[in-house]
Structures are given as structure tokens and as C-alpha cells.
Image (tube, rainbow, N blue to C red):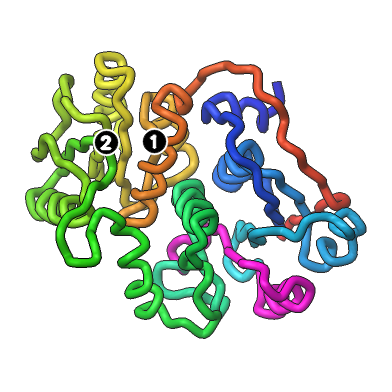
Amino acid sequence: MSPTNTIASDLGLNQASKRHLLWIGATAGLELGMAYTWIANRTNVVRACSPQAAIATDSLSGGPLPSIAILAADWPGRWALRDAVLLSKRWPLLRIVSVASSLVDGRRRSGPVLPGIEEVSWYDFPSRFECWCKDIDAGRPSLLGLPTTARREERLLESIPMVMPAIGRDGNAATGSALTVSLVASQAVDLDGLTDLLTLAGWRITRSGCGQPELDEPADVLVWDIGSIQSSQLARLRMLSANRPKLAIVLLESFPRGDSTLMALRSGATAVLGRPFMLESLRGTFLRLEREGRTGWQIGKRTDRQSSTRADLGPCSLAR
């Protein structure tokens, strides 16, 4: 079995609604490989090595316009502003997003390099993509609809009504997600922040506490602020997953890496998000749970899946 097929089986991917996406850049490596494998099983993907290759090919001629273009950044400085300009000139209404590996993550936290391009870490990408699709299908512009000159503060303000659907126009709590949530954190201050944030967003908190989660967590979803993934926590995760196989477990880790994330997924985690996290990432994770259910995410599950449509635009030489 090839490494790509192994990753696909480990992630428990399934086929869902289709949309046209343009992936530009590397798919090698565990982190970008997981991000690409998930999106390729969720969406019709056309893959190109560079913006020039995507524009020059005839594969897109006469076909549907891509909904979103992904610039896969496997190291800092992979893409320049001229690359985004080329894509914008070819497809003026194209939404452009940069997906960053761990090598780019540290630089990303200090500020984006490409003006006007939303940059997303590889581990947050699947959940945030779910939010973008939900907003686009509902006729909302989503965060990708903001002008390229929008500042970080403006993007934050615009995200508030998008990621807090449970708050009505009059300020009163409306009907939110049907999922119930348990919260666990290492420190009390982190637990208080999580509790206030998720309560304000409209999710129902059934239990919260510090330390390690109980084996009989009563909620549909456990949000565990794990800090950093250690062997003892993986052992607890396996016991919890075995005791509550239908419990969705979302881990919050300071700097998720490909190897530790894959071990957590294989141990029973549903998703691993970075901390500090965006509420949009958590909302997207909940949307995926409501659409697919926990069983659709079981790690190591072997299912017969129909391959998604992909087109590779020529050989890729992506060595630095």
C-alpha cells in the first residue's frame, strides 16, 4: 500500500459534497500530505506545481472555475506576492488561501507574509474549510470574501457573527448546536477561558474540569486542552476511546506536528487543533461531526471509497 493510501486509511476519510478546488504546490511530507489527502477525498481537486503551470494547462479550459486556490507552503518564502497576482489576474473572483506546514507555522504566528492572503496551518485547514463551504453554500461571503486590504483586526471583527451562530440578533441565546460538550484543561485559567468562549458561542457544557478527562464523559464531544501530546496522555486517550467509542475527542495542542498528530488520531482523537485556536476551527470541527458523525472519522477504519476526481498538471519538482 502506498504512503498516500495509508494516510487516507488512517484518517478514515469519506466522500462528501463536491466542489472544485485548485491545489498548488507540494503534497509530499506527512503534514501537507494529510491536508491534501483529506481535501482530495472531500472535494474535486486539480493539482499543479506552480501558478504558471495552473494557468498554462488546458485542463481548466472550458471547465468549471475553481472555488478556492490553495498555495501549499512547505517552507517559508515558498510563495511570493507575484504568484497570488498571477492567479488573481487569471481568475479575478478566485479565493486564495495559503496552507502552511510546521516549518512555516512559527513565522506565520508573527504575521502573514502575503498581503491579503489568508494563511492557515495545515492542522486547522480541514475544519476551517468546512466553515468556508457552509458559509458559501448559505450565500454568506465567509472570511474569504473580505477585501485583500483587510487588516487582521478587521478580519477578527468580521468573524464574530460568522462563528457565533447561536447568538440571536437581539443578543439572546438562540438554538445552537445539538452537540453537548465536555471541557478539560491543564490549568484553571485555560479552563475558564474555554468555558466562557464556548458558552458564549452557544454550545452546551455538560462537564468541565482540570487534569485528565474521566472515562465516562457524558457529552457528545470532549474538548481537551492537552498542551503537548505525551505518551501518558496518548495512553489515556486510548482508554477513553475504547470506553466511549462514540465520543468525539478534539485535542488542543500548542504546536501540532505531523507525527504527534497522527499518533493522536490513531489513538482515538477526532481532530487536533492548535492553541491558541480560532473559534472558526472548532465550529468547523463541530460541523463535520454533525454532517458525518463520529463513526465516519474512526482512525484505521477500512472502507471502500470512490476516488475523487483529480488532475495532476505535469511533473512536480519541488525541492528547495
Q: Judge by depth and name the residue closer to the eye, 247 or 105.
A: 247
Residue 102 visible in the shown view: no
Sooner in the amino-acid sequence: mark 1 or mark 2: 2
Q: Mark 1 points at which residue?
A: 290
Q: For residue 89, which quarter of the picture?
A: bottom right
Q: Which residue sits furthest front?
A: 170
Residue 27 horizontal/vertical position (percent): 68, 47
How far apart marks 1 and 2 lie (CA) works out to: 8 Å
Circle 2: is it few (<14), some (14-19), or many (20+) Cα within 10 Å? some
Above or below, comparing residue 288 to residue 273 in the picture: above
Q: Judge by depth and name the residue closer to the eye, 219 or 183.
A: 219
Above or below, comparing residue 144 to residue 16 in the picture: below
Residue 283 horizontal/vertical position (percent): 35, 49
Which amino acid type is shown beneath numbered disc 2?
Leu
Q: Is residue 64 left or right of residue 252?
A: right
Residue 135 visible in the shown view: yes
Q: In this view, does 289 lie to the left or right of 228?
A: right
* Residue shown at the point (53%, 80%) measured from the top left: 147
Circle 1: is it few (<14), some (14-19), or many (20+) Cα within 10 Å? few
Residue 311 horizontal/vertical position (percent): 81, 45
Magenta residues, as a range? 79-107
Q: Judge by depth and name the residue closer to the eye, 318 or 22.
A: 22
Quadrant location of the N terminus in the rendered image: top right
* Residue shown at the point (58%, 35%) measured from the top left: 16
Q: For residue 186, which quarter of the picture?
A: top left
Q: Disc 1, disc 2: CB below 8 Å?
A: yes
Tag shown at residue 179? 2
Above or below, comparing residue 164 to residue 11 in the picture: below
Which amino acid type is shown beneath numbered disc 1?
Glu
* Residue shown at the point (66%, 41%) measured from the top left: 40
Q: Does the magenta stretch include residue 131?
A: no
Quadrant location of the C terminus in the rendered image: bottom right
